[in-house]
Amino acid sequence: MSFSFGTTLRVQIFGQSHAPSIGCVVEGLPAGIHVDMEALQRFMDRRAPGRTPWSTPRKEADVPHVLCGLNAQGDTCGAPVTMVIENTNTRSKDYDRLQRVPRPGHADYSAWAKWGADHDVRGGGFFSARLTAPLCMAGGIALQILESRGVCIAAHVAQVGTVQDEPFDALNNSIEAQRHLSEQMATLRALPSDAFPTLNADAGSQMIELIDTTRRALDSIGGVVECVATGMPAGVGGPRYDGLQGAVAHVVFGIPAVKGLEFGEGFGVAELCGSQNNDPYEMREGQPVPSTNHAGGSLGGITTGAPVLFRMAVKPTPSICAPQASVDLSSMDATTLEVHGRHDPCVAARAVPIAEAAMALALLDSWLSHPSGKTPR
Ligand SMILES: Cc1cc2nc3c(=O)[nH]c(=O)nc-3n(C[C@H](O)[C@H](O)[C@H](O)COP(=O)(O)O)c2cc1C
């Protein structure tokens, strides 16, 4: 069982939803990097629960406490950076029945099949999305380091149900498309931390309405998060098992509720001919550059210099108030379950900074582990 990932940048997350605290240990960060704790807190606030109608009412401040790894100036000192967040708002009573009656769609039954009654079901235990807070702490530092290297990362809710946001202009790599993409990223950066993160405000309002209608019908709904990184130099990553897509996928599939991941054109490639999907090259400022970006920023596992683009599908939240069939594992009798307590009616909006954190950690690790021979380490 592993709670860690990464090659040079090794990240371990720990904790449970209703344990006293959750946290992360980040090894392999270059020394001498100043960590801006205020910027890190602003990033954490975008994921924190309890502040918006589309998230769980469980209120948590999610303030990172650095235990070690920084020097007196707040710079990385070469030691692993260890950070914790206290869990302050737990209501374990809500989970008493779930110890025996597994929620359809959650990990209660599969965890029982593995560990029996020893599994800590309170708040979802270590399957809980609470553990994406430490992922965001580690990812927030990676974002700051990448930013100092000229890499910008942004994500938005691309879809909830059938309502779609305007997509990132990242499948084209023309100068105009690059300009448009950086405007889109600036729009997202300018949003307040409790805003619903879409590019098109009308699409956002329709999504919020749909989430609210679904919640009032005692149900939940799925969505898609689209994430882009600009400024990655060509030549980072490696073939096959050192590939960039694999590095991103490893972190992204560790995010609870993620059921699908596609890069660039993704599953759309099935409908294209090579002449449409290939990204032709042109010379810009003395360098070959792909003029389109159907590849989503990497070929053969190695960056092309075009934006790295992925879309991840998140399933509807498993815990819903509507009655569902289940089994009482103590008697093996059929029963009906209505899940009450505090749950996100749609996880897509809170998954936006989590996608950015995953992208940042995968890109920085690939850069540190498999740099281009031509770019600075
Ligand atoms: C940001 C976020 C918030 C989530 N909130 C909830 C929640 O409130 N209730 C719930 O049952 N599942 C929630 N989930 C999903 C479950 O954690 C997840 O479905 C469960 O651990 C089973 O894992 P799997 O869906 O990856 O198979 C959330 C996921 C994310 C990413």
Image (cartoon, rainbow, N blue to C red):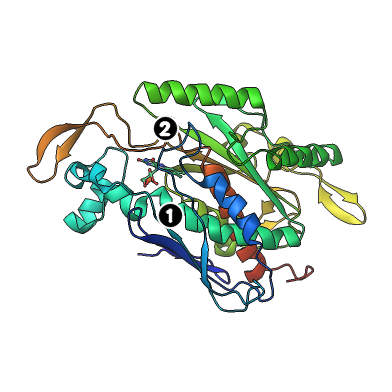
x and y percentages locating residue 52 in the rendered image: 50, 35
**Taking 107 as reference, is 194 left or right?**
right
**Kind of element beneath mark 1:** helix
x and y percentages locating residue 174 in the rendered image: 83, 40
Q: Is residue 244 above or below residue 101?
A: below
Q: Quadrant of residue 362?
A: bottom right
Residue appearing at x 78%, y 68% in the figure: 375
Residue closer to the observer: 302 or 105:
105
Residue 30 visible somewhere in the drawing: yes
Residue closer to the observer: 276 or 64:
64
Residue closer to the observer: 301 or 226:
226
Amino acid type, residue under disc 1 in the picture: Leu
Amino acid type, residue under disc 2 in the picture: Pro
**Taking 310 as reference, is 176 left or right?**
right
For the residues marked 2 and 1, what is the alpha-carbon distance in whole angstroms? 18 Å
Q: Quadrant of residue 319?
A: top left
x and y percentages locating residue 94 in the rendered image: 25, 42
Q: Is residue 235 above or below residue 188?
A: below
- Tell me the tag on residue 131: 1
**Taking 212 as reference, is 353 left or right?**
right
- Tell me the tag on residue 345: 2
